[in-house]
Image: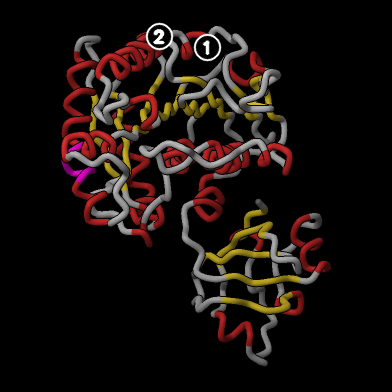
Amino acid sequence: MRSDLLKNVSRVVVKFGTGILTDENRQLDSNRVGQLVAQVSELHSSGKEILIVTSGAVGAGMGILGFKKRPVQLSELQACAAVGQSRLMTIYTELFSKHGINVAQVLLTHDDVEHHDRHLNVRNTLVTLLNHRVVPIINENDVVSTTELKFGDNDRLSALVATLLPADLLIILTSVDGLIENYGKPDERVIPIVNKIDSNTEKLAGGTVSHLSVGGMKTKIEAAKIVVRSGIPMIIASGKKKDTLANIFALKEEGTLFVPNEKKLKGRKRWIAFFHHPKGTIFLDNGAKIALREKGKSLLKPGIIRCEGQFSAGDVIMICDIDGTEFARGITRYSAEQICSNEKITNEVVHRNDLVIL
């Protein structure tokens, strides 16, 4: 399975978490960053296209500004990011230059990938950098991002970058060896492969206990859901080892591999499914759910039980079953007011071309 999925990988997104970039004093650990850069440089030299999604700006800024815990106030988080990001890029630039590799800073907000023209522009910029053998160093623009506009965490950001391109593989490097069963017990073990993300997989994922980080294994599982649905494999592995990336591409059993769906989503469908903050929700009866999921139909008004939120025609909305479980997303052709009124609607509320089953 690993051989089949990884042998022809060319374009790789690698995510560095805060926990592997900073030391116990909350300062950037130059030695650790150096060994990570060395691993990436080796892959780059082998001809692979590499993009890095990096955390660490807020963590670096915390150390410089004297915070002992991750700030809660937005203005303090943004101040840490502003101070830390420049230091982070300086270190990356110096370390990669020793390997003869140029880097580029790319700071993104959610708006940059939600708006369709900007979405395509980001993709074109990243592809152009790769064509020039430059390694993009990508981070959320925490200095200006607000709660309403944020990606949420860099695990999600890395999944969206991989989906945007698309990449051939996403690797999330963290402080543990992978998704672990029986964590903290004598019989704990790394799960080598996840064929399907289900409730049992999600039970293994807890939140973080680090004062530096935002997410934990839970956010990595959420990232995996995005990429595997897009048809991209993902690996969670340790960023503390010096040979993790080499082992992965030597097809050794390193970390946890998430197997992608066989059917890949096309670019526009990926954009609809993953790059929006949905403006509202509609709930369907079982007949409509079956028609969408199993018969490939468009959504008609008679199948809609109710809707929530104030959305307009052209907005992306969540589509849920009668129990409230989201199973699709789509671009609505009618507003919430029109759908929930007695107005007769004979055309599709969400056309099949504008709908993605999750």
Identity of the residue drawn at 21% across and 44% down: 80
Total numbered badges shown on the rendered structure: 2
Which disc number belongs to residue 249?
Answer: 1
Q: Look at discs 2 and 1 and give the one toward the viewer.
A: 1
35 over 72 or under it: above or below: above
* Boundaries of the magenta span: 80-84
> Contact (CB < 8 A) between labels 2 and 1?
yes
Kindly report the secondary structure that dominates the magenta region of the rendered protein.
helix
User: Residue 113, can we see it?
Assistant: yes
**Residue 64 % position (x, y):** 17, 35
Which disc number belongs to residue 306?
Answer: none
Check residue 52 for magenta coloring: no
Check residue 83 for magenta coloring: yes
Q: Estimate the spatial distance between the alpha carbons at disc 2 and disc 1, rounded to whole Å.
A: 11 Å
Name the outermost residue toward the bottom: 342
**Numbered disc 2: secondary structure:** loop
* Residue 132 relative to residue 264: left or right: left
Colour scheme employed for the rendering of this structure:
secondary structure
Quadrant of the image containing the N terminus: top right
**Numbered disc 1: secondary structure:** helix
Q: Nearer the viewer, residue 124 or 198?
A: 198
Specify the amino acid type for callout 1.
Phe
Q: Residues within 10 Å of mark 1 (few under 14, many from 20)?
A: some
**Residue 290 % position (x, y):** 81, 61
264 over 49 or under it: above or below: below
Identity of the residue drawn at 76% across and 69% down: 322
Identity of the residue drawn at 38% across and 47% down: 120
Pointer 2 or 1: first along the chain? 2
Which disc number belongs to residue 46?
Answer: 2
Q: Residues within 10 Å of mark 2 (few under 14, many from 20)?
A: few
